[in-house]
Image: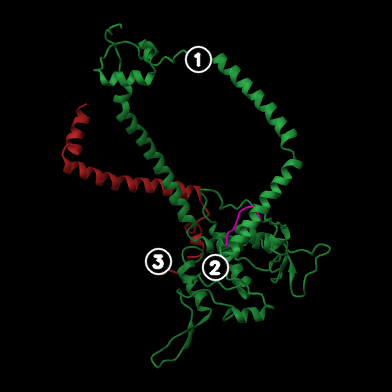
Amino acid sequence: MLSRLSTTTALRAASSLRPTLTSTPIRSLTTTPASSPFADRRAAVTWLAKAAAGSLVAGYTLSEYVFTDERLAPVNEAVYNVAQAVSKKAKEMGLEVKLPFLEAHAFSMPDHGLHPPHYPWDHYGWNKTFDHASLRRGFQVYKEVCSACHSMDYIHYRNLVGVTHTEAEAKALAAEYEYKDGPNDVGEYFMRPGKLTDAMPRPYPNEEAARAANGGAYPPDLSCISRARHGDENYIFSLLLGYCDPPAGINIREGLHYNPYFPGGAIAMARSIFDECVEYEDGTENNASQIAKDVSTFLGWASYPEHDERKKMGMKFLVMSGILMGFTVWWKRFRWSYIKSRKIVYKPSKVEQI
Amino acid sequence: MALTTSVYNLFFRRSSSFMFTVFAGAFVFEAAFDTVADGAWDYMNRGRQWKDIRHKYINAAPAEESE
């Protein structure tokens, strides 16, 4: 009778009695009762095969002959009508209820912009910093090409120090422009040469002036443009070099240009990156793709200035976590060794037969 | 065994010396870990960081660099 008790019952009984440590194997407690349908492997496999075959037949029959499209369509329509009616009624009562699955959204690639390809940027590796020589060239491209129309309000000359330029160079760069400052001791505003704490100079004093000068289009600020556009550097790189003739049937308004990567396809910015439009000081080849790559990298840095330090901290974090994981596993095994190695054996005493 | 015993007696036995061991160990470990990790990082990114190209632009500008 006792041998037919389930394992849990036996254990509960064991804990209520005083456990005796003997050399009896623990296996005797964990025998599965013979009444289980999965007692032997063969029965289980047969049962599984039968269940699979049955499901296959039942599923095929139901989907092919019972729940056909002709029968489901009226049900769908009824559900849709009820949902619409409920939604309408709720709207009449002043409740704006938005039920799911009632609207269909068409997706059109020209409207959303062609997805840029994923280029193998050399700073995309988990352990790679920006290529700072490329950042320096990219700043030069920004300064000589982009800054004619685009502002960069959140990048200051001090941000360049120790990233692309020395302090002396950054000071000299800032001093090339005049900034309005004041008021002085007689309350007047005056112009002074730029300092390290000044931001990149704006091409236009305000958005209205920028729109007026660009046919109504506002050249966006480039400080965080890489964060602000899907695809980051890939998008900027593709956009800069993606200008082409519009396909047949698409008319581009006067003053706009066709670029498949730009949402809508019609962009006010004309192509600005050409072969040899910038002369690099370090002798790097200045073809259009190199220039676009450098300026995309620079704009990536402007959006993610913490990039290098973040990846380094990430690497240190992973290494430390690995070490601590090892310690944790060892500590757990150390603490559990007592529990794992002990044996509880239930030795039934004589039971009076009724 | 004698070494283990003397290490235990010296560094771990008293609570005060144990605390000292913890703090001193943290200090030494962090310095060593950062040195090794930064070295590995600089090796993986050799030629890419500002400190690798800085020498090209620093000439004839003495004592101005704070970076």
Residue A116 horizontal/vertical position (percent): 67, 56
Q: Which of the colour schemes (rainbow, by chain, secondary structure, one colour) is used?
A: by chain
Q: Which quarter of the figure has residue A324?
A: top left
Q: Which chain is green?
A: A
Specify the label residue A223 is tagged with: 2
Which residue is rendered at x = 60% and y = 17% of the image? A46
Q: Residue at x 29, y 25 (%)?
A: A338
Report the chain shown in red.
B
Q: Do the residues labelled 1 and 2 touch (CB within 8 Å)?
A: no
Is the residue under label 3 in contact with that under label 1 (CB below 8 Å)? no
Residue at 73%, 46% (x, y): give it. Answer: A74
- Report the disc number at residue A39: 1
Q: Quadrant of the C terminus of chain B?
A: bottom left
The reply, left or right, for residue B60 in relation to residue A204 is: left
Which chain hosts label 1?
Answer: A
Residue drawn at (65%, 62%) of the image: A292
Residue nearest the observer in this picture, A25 or A309: A25
The residue wearing badge 3 is: B66
B41 vs A133, left or right, is: left
